Amino acid sequence: MLVRRGALGLWLLIAVLAIAVVARTQLRADMAAFLPRSSTEAQQVLIEQASSGASSRIVLLAIEGVPPATLIPLSKALAAHLKQDAAFADVLNGNEASSGMRDFVWTNRYLISDVTAEQFTAAGLRAALLNDLGLLGSDMAPLLQQTMPGDPTGEIVKLLSRLAGPSGPHTSGGIWLSSDESRAVLMIHTRAAGFDIDAEDRALARIHAAFDDARREVPDASPARLAETGPVVFAVGTRDTTVNDAKRLSILATAIIAGLLAFAYRSPLVLLLGLLPVASGALAAIAGVSLAFGFVHGITLGFGVTLLGESVDYAIYLFTQTIRGDPPQATITRIWPTLRLCALTSIVGFAVMLFSDFIGFAQLGLFSIIGLIAAIGTTRFILPLLMPQAFFATGAEFVGRWLAAAMLYRAWLRPLIVVMTFAAAAALGLHRGGFWDGDLTNLSPIPAPMQTLDRTLRSDLGVPDLRYFVVVRADTEQSALEASETLAGRLQTLVTQGRIGGYDVPSAILPSEHTQKARQAALPDGETLRARFNEALTGLPFRADLFEPFFGDVARARSSPLLTLASLPSALALRVDSMLVQRDNGWELIAPLYKVADPAGVAATLAGAGLQAAQLIDMQQESAQLLLQFQHEAVSLAVIGSIAIVALLWLFLRSLTRVAAVTAPLAAALVITAALLTFGGGKLSIFMMVGFLLTVAVGSNYCLFFERAYHDAETQKRSIASIVLANLCTVSAYGIMTLSSIPVLHDIGMTVAAGTFLSMLFAAFLSAGRIVPEAVGQNRPRSGRT
Amino acid sequence: MRVTGLAICAGILLCALGIESEAGAATQEPWGLPQLMAALGQVKSAAGQFTERKTMHMLTQPLIASGRLAYVAPAHIEKVTASPMPEKLVMDGDRVTIVSGPTNDTHTFSVTDFPQIGGLVEGIRATLAGDLPTIERIYTTRLSGAPAAWDLQLVPRDEDLARFVKWIEFRGDGNHIRTIDTEDSAGDRSEMTIVEDVRDAR
C-alpha cells in the first residue's frame, strides 16, 4: 500500500512539475535550430534569407473576375487600404509604383546620386544644359520636362532607373494588369518576418478584410475574387494544411484505434488508461527539452510526439497480455524483462541523435529518451495500480489468431523472405543516382496549381528568383557601407561585361557617411553656383529664371542632415535591412545578384576585388549541400545506433543467435520497406528517416516478444494477440497519414505503416520458438526451440 | 510640348491610314467622322518625311527637328530624327523604345507608364482599329471642312489627360494628313508637317 501510494505520489509530483515547466516553455519555429552547429556563413545566410529576408515577406496578389474598368479602381482602393496599415512595409500595384520612394529620392538626390565636383564647374554645367536642350527636342521631353528646372544635371532620372523595383507587367490606368487584362496584380512586403507565421496569418487576414472593404466601395466589384501567392502565403498555407490534415487524419485514426481497442478491451476506463504512458511521456519530454535547451522547436515537438507513438504499444502489451484471472501486477512482472528491453533498445537507438551536429536532431533525441523513460515508468509502476484488478482483454482473443495460424507455414515462408530481402537489397544498390532525394522542391507541400500561379505572377511582375548572393563581412555599419560602395563598382563592371544582369547593394540607397559628406562637399555655394551657371547658360535658348528651383535645392542639400537607416521610408528600409545584417561580431553585407550568366567568372572577379572575404553564395547549391550533410549525418547516426542496439541486445540476451533472431527480421523489414518506397525510381526523403526511426523502435519490440520462449499456450496466444493489436493500431494510424498531401505526413505514414507491418510478419515467420499447438486451436505438433 | 512625341505617332498613323476621298466623293454619301475612320483601316504600311517645330515656354526660341516616319500595321511606328540630333523612337504595341544621345542610350517603357501619354496612345490605337467609340470615349471630336480639305480637332474628355494635352488638331487634304498641331496645358505647342512618299493600302 505504501509503495503504491509512493509511486502514485511521485508520478503526480513529476507531472505537476512538468506542467509548470511546459507552461513556461518557449516554442520556437525559426529554422536556425535545424542548422548544423558548425554551420558555414553561407548556410546562415541561406536560412536567414529563407526565414526573414525581404523575399520571405512577399505576398503577391491577383484580383480577378471583373472587367479591367472595375479592376483598376479596385486595385487602387485595395492598395489605399493596405498602405494605411502598419502591418505592411510596402504596397506596390503599379500606380505610383515608386512614389513613396520617389519623393524621398527627389529630396535627397544629391546625397544618393554619385555627384562629383566636375559636374558643378561651368564646363560641367554647360555639358548638362546642352544635354537638356537635346532632350527637350527629343521624344523623351514629356517625361523630363517637369524635373528639369530643379534637376538640370538629371540625377533623378539616373536614380529612379537604378532603384526601380519590379518593372511590372503591363500598366493600364496606372495600375499593373496581366497582359490579357484579366487580373490586376499587386506586390506587398509584410513588416513581419516570414518565419513569424502567426503574424503573417494576421497580415493575410487584414488583406482579406481590406479587399472586402475595397469591393464594397467600388461599384460593380462584387464578383471580384482575390488570389494570393508568395512565400508568406505558402508558409501560412502549409501550416494550416498540415494542422488541418493532422487534425482530420488523427481524428479518423483515433476513431479507428479507439474502435479496435474498445473491441479488444471492452472497458472505457482501460481505453483511457492506455493513453496515460504516451501523455506522461510527452509532458516529461517537453519539460526536459525545455530545461536542457531553453526552448522547444516546433519540429521537435511534432516529430517527437510521433516517435513517442511507440509508448502507446506499452499499454497494449500490458493490457492484452494479462491472462484471465491474473492480477495486473503478475502480468507486468512476467513481461517486464522483455518490455524493459523494448524500451531500452529504442532509448539507445534514439540516444545517438544527442550527438548530432544539428540542434534539431539533438533535441529530438533528448525528447524521445525522456519521453520513453517516462512512458515505460508509467506503464511499469502506475498502470497496474490504476487498471481494474480483474481486467481481461476479452476481445483480443481473436485478433492474433490469423497470424498464429500463418506461423504454422513459416518454414515455407522463410526462404521467400530471404529471397525478397536480397532482391530488395540489390534493387537499392542498383538504384539509379542514389536513393536520397536531393531536390528540395519535392519536400514542398505547396500544391502544383499554386506554384504555377506563383511563377506566373512572378514573371509578370519581374520579381527575380534570388539564387546568387555576394557576402562581405565588416566591423562596423559604416565600413560595411563603404565595402558596399567598393563592391558596387566591381558589380557594375560585371554588368557592363554582361556576366550578370543586375545587382542590389545597400549603399545604392544608403551611402556611407564618408561618401555623403564627399558629395555635399562637391556642391558649390550659392554665389559660386550662380556665377558658374550663368557662364554655362551663355548663348543657350533657356528662359532666364527657369532654373531657380535648382539653386534652392543645391543650397539645401549642402547643409541637409546625412541619411541614416532610420530616415529611410519603410520600403527602402526593408531593402537595406535585408542586405545589411548585424552579427555578434560585426556586420554582414548580403548583396543579391540577378541573372548570373557566369558564376565562376563572377567568383573569380570578386576574389580579386580587394574586399575582405567577399564570397559568392549559390543558394541552390548551399541548400542541396545542407540537405546532403543532413543525410550523411542521418546515415552515420543510423549505423552507430544500430551498433549500439546490437551491443545492448547482446548485453541482455548473452547469445549471438538470439541477437540475430531479434535483429534479422527487423533488418529484412527495413530493407524491403526502403526498396518499396524507392520502387520505380522514387527517392527517400529526410522525413522517411523519422519514419525509419519509429519503425526500428516499434518493430524491435515485436521481434523481442516473438523471440521470447513461451511454455504455455495462453501466454503465447496473448503475446501474439498483443502484437497484432498493437500493429493494427500502428498501421491504421500511420496508414491514414498516407492520405495526406503534405509530404512530411505522407512520407512518415507510408514508411511506418509498411515498415512495422513487415516487421511483425517477419518477426513472426523468422522466429524459431515452438508454437504451442493450442495457441492456434489446432493439434499439429511442431518442433522448435524451447 | 509634352505631347509632341505622341502627336507625331498620331500623325503618322492617321497619315498612313489615309483617307479614301475618291470613293467618298464618287458615291455622294454624306461625309463625316465614321467615313473618315472606316477608311483608316485600309493601310498596311506607309512612310514619309516630317518637319517639326516646337515652341516651348522653357525656351526663348523654337526647336526645329526633321526626319522620317514609318508605319506598319497594326501597331508598329518608327520615328527616326536626323536633325538636329540623331534619335530613334520605336513604338511596338504598348512598348516604346527611344534610342538617343551620343552613347545610344536606350530607354524602354510601356506607354501607359506615363499618364501624360497613355490617353493619347489609346486614342491612336482605337483610330488604328477604326474604333470610333473608343476615340469618342477619350476625346470630344470636331470635324470640319470637306474630304478635299478637312480639319479634325480632338479635345480630351478626361481631366487627368487634359492636364497634359489641351488639344490635337489634324489637317488633311484628300487622303493625306498634312499637319498635326498639338498644344499642352502649359501652352507649349508642336506643329508638324508630313510629306508622305510610300504607301501600301488594301
Image (tube, coloured by chain):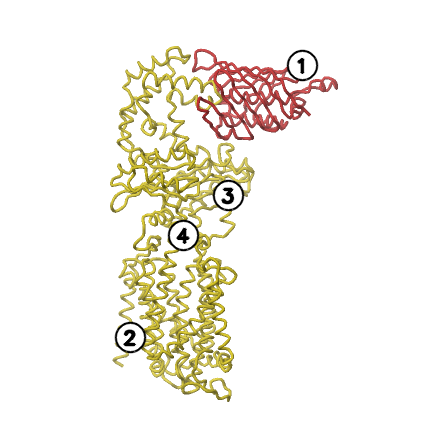
Q: Amino acid at mark 1?
A: Ala
Q: Earlier in the sequence, mark 4 or mark 2?
A: 2
> Pointer 3: residues within 10 angstroms few (<14), some, or many (20+)?
few
Q: Return the residue at label 4.
A: A624
Q: Return the residue at label 3.
A: A456
Which chain does the red colour mark?
Answer: B
Q: Position of residue A583 (x, y in %)?
A: 27, 45
**Residue at mark 4: chain:** A
| Circle 4 or circle 1, nearest the eye | 4
The N terminus of chain A - image quarter? bottom left
Q: Return the residue at label 2.
A: A8
**Residue at mark 3: chain:** A
Which chain does the yellow colour mark?
Answer: A
User: Residue A179: which quarter of the image?
Assistant: top right
Q: CA distance from mark 2 to mark 1?
A: 111 Å
Q: CA distance from mark 4 to mark 1?
A: 74 Å
**Residue at mark 1: chain:** B
Q: CA distance from mark 3 to mark 2?
A: 62 Å
Q: Return the residue at label 1.
A: B148
Q: Earlier in the sequence, mark 3 or mark 4?
A: 3
User: Residue B50: which quarter of the image?
Assistant: top right
A207 and A678: which is toward the camera: A678
> Pointer 1: residues within 10 angstroms few (<14), some, or many (20+)?
some
Q: Amino acid at mark 3?
A: Thr
